[in-house]
Amino acid sequence: MDKKRVIFICIHNSGRSQMGEGFLRHLAGDRFEVASAGLEAGKLNPLVVRSMAEVGVDLSSHYSKKAQDLIDAGERFDTVITVCDETNAERCPLFPGRGTNANAQRLHWGFPDPSALAGTEDEKLAAIRPIRDAIRLRIDTWLKEQQ
């Protein structure tokens, strides 16, 4: 059976979408082919990488990708999950669907932007953890709906 293809999209592909990709691959990589991308390519947030390592998900080999590059390459996804704020979610591209779908299923799960956090490195890391945990919880819920 073909794995369902899922992509997480945010602004710079530096935090939220990378966490989504990492969690879904970690939890259900046997059922889903997972990617992430941003409206613009940014730089992977090292504090996001650290926070994910704390829960056993390794993002150290991840890098930021542009959604438009995947569209231009002809990539198709069954589900597109935007994880940015409402205003920017509207800017997210529509990916062509797979199979008989004209367009991919589009979901929006809004989460705060880790790159917008202020404070010391320790304070930022402490503020990223609840975002990380909320993304994990939302993915757990979604996975239960997929069975």
Image: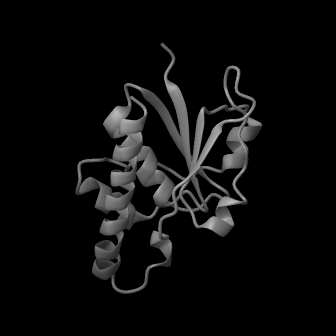
User: Measuring 67% from the left and 31% from the top, which residue is drawn there?
Assistant: 76
Q: Is residue 147 above or below residue 58?
A: above
- Count all numbered tags in the image, as a single digit: 0
Q: Report whether 55 appears left or right of 13.
A: left
Q: Is residue 114 left or right of residue 41?
A: left
* Viewer-side residue, 146 vs 139: 146
Q: Is residue 61 visible?
A: no
Instruction: Tell me the quadrant of the picture where the C terminus can be found.
Output: top left
Residue 50 in picture, x, y percent from top left: 30, 61
What residue is drawn where x is 33% and y is 39%? 26
| Depth order, front residue of 44/67 | 67
Residue 8 x/y as whole percent = 54, 48
Figure check: 24 above or below 120: above
| Residue at 42% over, 85% down | 118
The residue drawn where x is 28% and y is 75% is: 126
Residue 41 figure quarter: bottom right
Residue 80 appears in the picture as rendered? yes
The furthest residue to the top: 1
x then y, percent, for residue 94 = 73, 44
Residue 107 appears left or right of 71 = left
> Up-down: is 52 above or below 1?
below
Q: Position of residue 42 (x, y in %)?
A: 59, 62
Judging from the image, the colouring scheme is one colour
Q: Residue furthest bottom?
A: 119
